[in-house]
Image: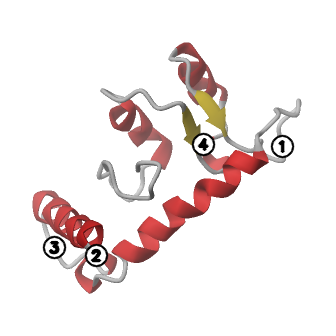
Amino acid sequence: MDALGNLAGFVLLPGQRHDSRGLGPLLDGVEPGALVADKAFDNNAIREALAGRGITAVIPPKADRATDIPCDYAMYSWRHLVENVFCSLKQFRRVATRYDKTDSSFAAMIHLAAIRLALR
């Protein structure tokens, strides 16, 4: 997703996989200044990979972390743009209920829905 709240890319994962598995392919070929994510992405491997690429991790720490990691909550407040994109895509019934049987046709529908949203 870009800074304006438009869908910039996505990775389809099986339902039983954690979303953090798709982070690597999404970041290939782009150099964001910061990654804003929720607590589910709070693990040392992701933080180290982002720091190695010079990307600021704006991820609040999980409650069970031994040491508190600082988070820029002012920047984190922009995460609502991500949620807005999901809500906008789910307005398309075919995306929300996943009528498509194959990954390629479902991905095509997400592309079409994102194009329609961008043209509004």
Residue holding disc 3:
100
Upstream in sequence: badge 3 or badge 4: 4
Location of residue 26 by image quarter? top left
Location of residue 31 by image quarter? top left
Residue at image coords 84%, 47%: 63
Considering the numbered disc 1 on the image, is that residue within a helix, a strand or a loop?
loop
Q: Do the residues bearing badges 3 and 4 touch, measured as CB atoms within 8 Å?
A: no
Residue holding disc 4:
41
- Percent coordinates x, y for residue 99 in the rendering: 20, 79
Tag of residue 74: none
Upstream in sequence: badge 1 or badge 4: 4
Closer to viewer: mark 4 or mark 2: 2
Upstream in sequence: badge 2 or badge 1: 1
Upstream in sequence: badge 2 or badge 3: 3
Q: CA distance from mark 3 to mark 1?
A: 39 Å
Question: What kind of residue is marked 3?
Answer: Asp
Position of residue 69 relative to residue 40, above or below, is above
Considering the numbered disc 3 on the image, is that residue within a helix, a strand or a loop?
loop
Closer to viewer: mark 1 or mark 4: 4
Q: Do the residues bearing badges 4 and 2 touch, measured as CB atoms within 8 Å?
A: no
Q: CA distance from mark 4 to mark 2?
A: 31 Å
Residue holding disc 1:
64
Question: Dot 3: few (<14), some (14–19), or many (≥20) neighbours within 10 Å?
Answer: some
Considering the numbered disc 4 on the image, is that residue within a helix, a strand or a loop?
helix
Of 3 and 46, the residue lying toward us: 3
Upstream in sequence: badge 4 or badge 2: 4
Residue holding disc 2:
120
